[in-house]
Image: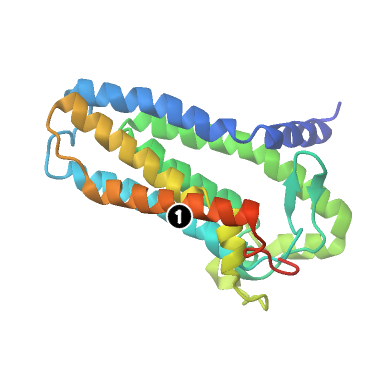
Amino acid sequence: MALQEEMEIQGNWLFKYRSYLPLTVFLVGTVLYLRREIYPSTFFLEDTPYEIYYEMFALAISLVGFFIRVYTVGHTPKATSGRNTKAGQIADKLNTAGAYSIVRHPLYLGNFFMWLGVAMLCGHIWFIVAFVLMFWIYYERIMFSEEQFLRKKFGDSYLEWSKNVPAFFLRFSNYKKTDIPFSWKKVLKNERTGLFELFLVFCLYDIAGELIGKTYKFNYFLIVMTILTGVGYFVLRYLYKKTTLLNEENR
């Protein structure tokens, strides 16, 4: 089998099991984070006034990724540049404006920053490097298979657009305003779990670290935000499952 076909097959397969990557990052990161708390000397900022700033910086990185996803999802129509594991790849229209005018895969870029923040929280430089390499290898194949599908479906239109838009690195000079209005309903429906899960992970790490160190100086900002986003998640889940309030035509 030619390498091109092999990478496309691998990409389609990896997409189906894409949820395992953040789970792996979380599990390995948890072990390293707990080790850091048990052996404070392994992290140069441990028990210093700067530790909290580093953790908040890691959270900020993750939030940047989340808001990239929010902006992208909010400006896209229904059934565009998306896939599901049952029906295969879906793209009724080629997105070329908004986030898609400065990078070809803004949702994957958002994922990268969200998980990078969690990886940084562990305070282990080699784990951060390993995460970046693993993400690139993993998502390179997914992006390749997605682009193969879009190229076959949209032909020259796709080639002309992709020629000047980077796959993963932002090029702000290319920005083209989208004529699709921002939809909060679509964001609330599609991204209802992301913010809660993000604050939950950071909050659990913080609580575990304080319990191990027996300092009990909990980060109440994380606790409050976890509770608020958790309540929001369950409210949105109910609205999504039991009502049509979040439904919107063509979105």
Q: Residue at x 44, y 48 (%)?
A: 196
Task: Name the image quarter holding the C terminus.
Answer: bottom right
**Rendering coords of residue 235 (x, y %):** 50, 54
Q: Indicate the position of residue 72 as horizontal and vertical percent values.
A: 59, 62
Where 227 sits versus 170, above or below? above
Residue 121 placed where, x, y %? 33, 38
**Residue 215 placement: quadrant:** top left
Q: For the residue marked with disc 1, what is the amino acid?
A: Gly
From the viewer's perspective, is 4 left or right of 120? right
Q: Which residue is tagged 1?
A: 232
Q: Residue placed at 20% from the left, 28% from the top? A: 211
Q: Is residue 188 visible?
A: yes
The mark tally for this picture is 1
Is residue 105 shown to the viewer in this render? no
- The crowd level at tag 1 (other Cα within 10 Å; few <14, some 14-19, many 20+) is some
Image position of 127 with respect to 141: above or below: above
Q: Is residue 206 left or right of residue 2?
A: left
Q: How is the image coloured?
A: rainbow
Residue depicted at 69% across the width and 40% down the height = 142
Q: Nearer the viewer, residue 241 or 167?
A: 241
**Image quadrant containing the N terminus:** top right
Q: Residue at x 39, y 29 (%)?
A: 29
Element at badge 1?
Answer: helix
> Vertical placement of 222 versus 185: above or below?
above
Q: Position of residue 194 (x, y in %)?
A: 50, 49
Q: Residue furthest front?
A: 242
Location of residue 62 with respect to 18 vertically, above or below:
below
Task: Report the front residue among 28 and 245.
Answer: 245
